[in-house]
């Protein structure tokens, strides 16, 4: 991922996730793991509470920028579906990341293995119907061009994700699924920037020579609903989960 584009045009990602930190309730001296930390803004916010925090991300570009941004914090390059630490954490935190991993069972197993008994798991990510209009536009354009269409993200319902957690010894204490129509940064190119930053996997079958035209066609389809009051918006739907690890329930 382009860490420069992420920081310059997509600050809403960590700004909207800031109110997830109080739900995590980090305390001084606790060990907290931040999965999908990006360039480290929320990792640093957790560290401000006095907790000892480790940021984890699978993107070398994101981890490299996070280390530049916050040289006093620890960041680890690793995949959310396959990681391990020698010491357990009091809590695992994740914002806007887990929908990128298509093997949620492996993610949850890794989280369970990293938590102390009674440890907390707090996450927000794309839920069922997330970016539905964008996906519909991509499918329309790609089918029109004879290209394969596959949704590259994992957007579960509350029930689906809670069931996965319970199988691994988690007890869900709160769960929410809600619409969040989100204004993108100013400029007529904001939707194009979003697709370049986050939609690259969605459009991976598109030849480079056709990519600009495909994005323009998608913008034409999306404009009537997602361009409002002179600004592009994204039709986010979020899943927010808080659970406690109770291995004795297994």
Image (tube, rainbow, N blue to C red):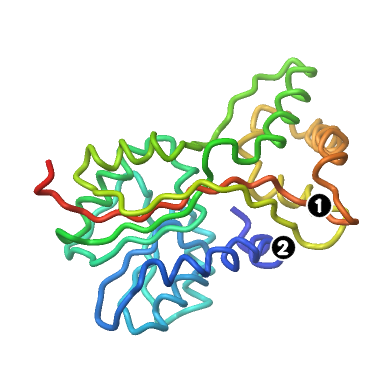
SS at badge 2: helix
Q: Please tell me which residue is depicted at 54% across the width and 69% down the height of the picture.
A: 65
Image-based side of 105 in relation to 136, left or right: left
Image-based side of 77 in relation to 66, left or right: left
- Which label number is shown at residue 9? 2
Residue 57: image location, x then y, percent: 43, 57
Residue 125: image location, x then y, percent: 50, 50
Give the quarter of the image for residue 61. Answer: bottom right
- Which label number is shown at residue 126? none
As drawn, 164 above or below 205: below
SS at badge 1: strand
Q: Earlier in the sequence, mark 2 or mark 1?
A: 2
Give the CA distance from mark 2 to mark 1. 13 Å
Q: Please tell me which residue is depicted at 29% across the width and 83% down the height of the picture.
A: 28
Residue 70: image location, x then y, percent: 48, 79
Q: Mark 2, residues whose alpha carbon is within 10 Å: few (<14), some, or many (≥20)?
A: some
Q: Nearer the viewer, residue 207 or 72?
A: 72
Give the quarter of the image for residue 222. Answer: top right
Q: Mark 1, residues whose alpha carbon is within 10 Å: few (<14), some, or many (≥20)?
A: many
């Amino acid at each position: 991922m382009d860490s420069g584009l992420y920081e310059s045009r997509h600050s809403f990602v960590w700004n909207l996730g800031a109110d997830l930190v109080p739900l995590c309730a980090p305390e001084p001296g606790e060990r907290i793991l931040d999965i999908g930390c990006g360039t480290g803004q929320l990792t640093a916010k957790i560290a401000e509470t006095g907790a000892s925090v480790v940021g984890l991300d699978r993107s070398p570009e994101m981890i490299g920028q996070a280390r530049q941004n916050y040289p006093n914090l620890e960041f680890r390059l690793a995949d959310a579906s396959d990681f391990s630490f020698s010491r357990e954490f009091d809590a695992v935190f994740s914002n806007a990341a887990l929908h990128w991993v298509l093997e949620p069972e492996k993610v949850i197993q890794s989280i369970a293995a990293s938590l102390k008994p009674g440890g907390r798991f707090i996450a927000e990510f794309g839920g069922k119907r997330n970016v539905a209009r964008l996906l519909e536009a991509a499918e329309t354009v790609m089918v029109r061009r004879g290209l394969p269409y596959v949704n590259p993200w994992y957007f579960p319902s509350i029930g689906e994700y809670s069931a996965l957690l319970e199988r691994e010894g988690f007890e869900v204490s709160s769960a929410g699924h809600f619409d969040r129509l989100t204004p993108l940064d100013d400029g007529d190119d904001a939707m194009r920037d979003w697709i370049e930053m986050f939609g690259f996997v969605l459009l991976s079958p598109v030849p480079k020579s056709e990519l600009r035209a495909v994005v323009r066609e998608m913008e034409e389809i999306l404009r009537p609903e997602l361009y409002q009051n002179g600004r592009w918006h994204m039709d986010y739907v979020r899943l927010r989960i808080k659970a406690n690890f109770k291995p004795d329930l297994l």
